[in-house]
Image (spheres, coloured by chain):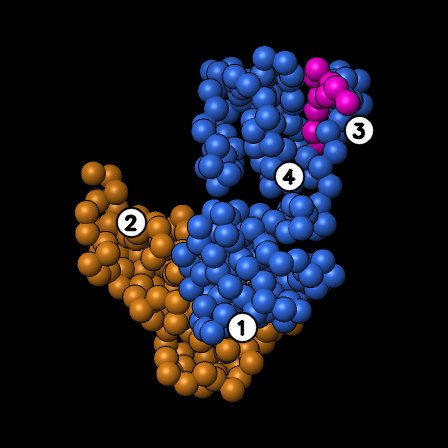
Chain colours: A orange, B blue
Amino acid sequence: MARQLARRRVARMAAEFDPRRPALLRRWVFVNAAPSVPDTTMLEALVLVVNEAVTASGATVPPDMTVRVDLRRGPDGVQCVVPVAVPLPPLSQDAPPSDAVLHNLWLAMRVSEEVGVAIEPHGAGSRITVMLLTGSWAKG
Amino acid sequence: MTPPDHACLLAVSEEQRAEVAADFVAVERDVVCFGFDLDWLRRRLAEDHRPPVEQAEHASPCGAVVTLWSTAHRLCLFDNDTLTGTRRAEVLAGHDGVVAAPALFDDGTLRITRVRDSLRFAGELDISNRHAMRVVRAAAPDAIDVGSLRFLDAGGAVALYAATHQRMRLLRPRLITKRVVELLDPRAERLVCVVTDHG
């Protein structure tokens, strides 16, 4: 019952992470997305893609800088937004990117059809949005 | 050699602690656990296909994270980095022996051990410990048991692929790990996922 109520509410949170040591990031995403994602495999797929987005972002900033992650959780699913310091090209499911920074993110986003990735221009850089939309897997 | 009646482990990582505890449960009889918050042990026992152990509703009598008590032996598991020098000396003086459980690599996030001709990964492989794949390159195993590998990022899979000399079996991969590996190496030219326990 508590879990069902939590799934109906919208919650927003943000935190900064060391992109070179992403274990804490993974715990944070797992715990905070879990109320909206009852399927553990889907949750692990989401965690993988956010991990790759933060690792990609970390490759564009100096070694001592953290990367911010904004997480929105609601009845429609979970969304994580990761800023990147440089402009990045959009990702296509079918074509592997030539950019080495993006290749691992592209590989991870193909793990699950339910997890989507969008890259948009944002100021002088870009913004990676990772989305897990509530689907048939979330019933029950 | 007869093992000490009352031994201790000063664990350098949770994965080492879980490994030693699971090994104790595997060979001892009627094991009872004294300690709380034992999810790490239950998880490892499940990964090793061991039955759950009985948990006493008491803390470890030695002040350890957990004490495993069998009909013949006691094993107290401490986390080394939580002990002061004085406390460490007390722990060592209060036990008959110290368990040694060396690893080829253990950074607290990923632990790599040798199991006969294979390797075993436990924990998480990510950008912070990709360099550990040098161990794989040096050991050139036929198989790696990844049943306790709970996270593998795409870069880690690429590093693992690059570290292999020939086809290598990955035993007991989790679903997401298997998917990452199969996307990277769709024809299984170097990394062959084997889902059954017996390879």
Marks 1 and 4: same chain? yes
- Give the vertical position of A41 relative to B93 (above or below): below
Q: Is residue B157 left or right of residue A132?
A: right
A78 relative position to B169: left or right:
left
Which residue is labeled 3 in the image? B85
In 3D space, how far apart are the residues under numbered discs 3 and 1 (Cα atoms)? Answer: 50 Å
Give the distance between the C-alpha atoms of the residues marked 1 and 4, in whole angstroms. 32 Å
Amino acid type assigned to the residue bearing label 2 in the image: Pro
Between marks 1 and 4 in the image, the one whose residue lies nearer the viewer: 1
Could you say where residue A35 lies in the image, as x and y percent from the top left? Answer: 30, 48
Q: Position of residue B188 (x, y in %)?
A: 50, 70
Residue indicated by mark 2? A38
- Under circle 4, the secondary element is helix
* Label 2: which secondary element: loop
* Residue that numbered label 1 is attached to: B189
Residue B2 among those drawn in magenta = yes
> Label 4 belongs to which residue?
B16
Asked if labels 4 and 3 share a chain, the reply is yes
Q: What's the chain of the residue with tag 3? A: B
Task: Tell me the residue at 56%/51% (across/down).
Answer: B145
Chain containing mark 2: A
Give the residue displayed 30% in from the left and 51% down from the top.
Answer: A39
Q: CA distance from mark 3 to mark 2?
A: 45 Å
| Residue B63, percent from left and from top | 63, 19
Position above or below: B188 against B36: below
- Give the Cα separation between the discs numbered 2 and 1: 35 Å
Q: Which residues are magenta?
A: B1-10
Q: Is residue B174 left or right of residue B80?
A: left
Nearer-the-camera pick, A64 or B52: B52
Cβ–Cβ below 8 Å for labels 4 and 2? no
Q: CA distance from mark 4 to mark 3?
A: 21 Å
